[in-house]
C-alpha cells in the first residue's frame, strides 16, 4: 500500500493506492488500486476517481510517495532464527555471506 501525494488542479491530493509504477509514457508514474474511501479527497474528486482502475500522473506533479507499513498483516515476515530444523521453509541467500 502506498500513499501518493501530488498536485491536481491547484490542490494537493493524497491517494492510497495498491501499486505505483514507472509509466510506459515518459515522464509519468502509474498508480492502480486506488482506495477513494481512505484518501483525503473532496466529494467531487472521489466521484472522479471512483471508476478509475489506473491513472498516470506527471512526475513533476508528484510531491512524494510513501510505502505504508501494513499492520496486522496475515503473513508476518519469517525471521531466520525462528525456523526450526526439519521445517519446510527455506531462506533464500541474499548474497555472498548467506
Image (cartoon, rainbow, N blue to C red):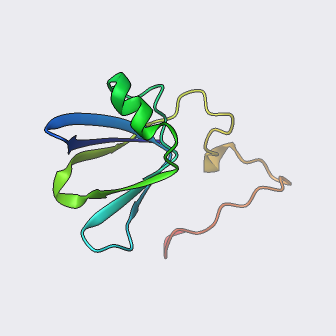
Q: Position of residue 45 (x, y in %)?
A: 35, 32
Q: Say if 33 sits above or below 27 in the image.
A: above
In this rendered view, identify the residue nearer to me: 85 or 54.
54
Numbered marks: total: 0
Apparent side of residue 14 relative to residue 78 in the rendered image (left or right): left
Apparent side of residue 65 relative to residue 75 in the rendered image (left or right): left
Question: Which residue is at a point 49% across and 35% down the rendered structure image?
Answer: 35
Q: Residue furthest left?
A: 10
Question: Which residue is at a point 62% across and 50% down the rendered structure image?
Answer: 80
Question: Which residue is at a point 83% across and 56% down the rendered structure image?
Answer: 88
Give residue 47's quadrant in the image: top left
Q: Position of residue 72 (x, y in %)?
A: 60, 27
Q: Position of residue 10 (x, y in %)?
A: 13, 38
Q: Position of residue 20 (x, y in %)?
A: 42, 55
Apparent side of residue 32 relative to residue 82 in the rendered image (left or right): left
Task: Look at the image and tell me in which quarter the C terminus lies.
Answer: bottom right
Q: Say if 41 sits above or below 9 in the image.
A: above
In this rendered view, identify the residue nearer to me: 19 or 28.
28
Q: Say if 49 sits above or below 57 in the image.
A: above
Question: Which residue is at a point 30% across and 35% down the rendered structure image?
Answer: 14
Q: Say if 70 sits above or below 66 in the image.
A: above
Apparent side of residue 49 relative to residue 73 in the rendered image (left or right): left
In this rendered view, identify the residue nearer to me: 13 or 63.
13
Amino acid at each position: 500500500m502506498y500513499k501518493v501525494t501530488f498536485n491536481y488542479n491547484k490542490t494537493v491530493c493524497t491517494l492510497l493506492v495498491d501499486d505505483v509504477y514507472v509509466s510506459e509514457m515518459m515522464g509519468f508514474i502509474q498508480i492502480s488500486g486506488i482506495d477513494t474511501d481512505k484518501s483525503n479527497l473532496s466529494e467531487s474528486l472521489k466521484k472522479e476517481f471512483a471508476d478509475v482502475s489506473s491513472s498516470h500522473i506527471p512526475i513533476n506533479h508528484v510531491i512524494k510517495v510513501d510505502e505504508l507499513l501494513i499492520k496486522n498483516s496475515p503473513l508476518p515476515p519469517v525471521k531466520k532464527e525462528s525456523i526450526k530444523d526439519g521445517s519446510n521453509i527455506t531462506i533464500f541467500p541474499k548474497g555472498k555471506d548467506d
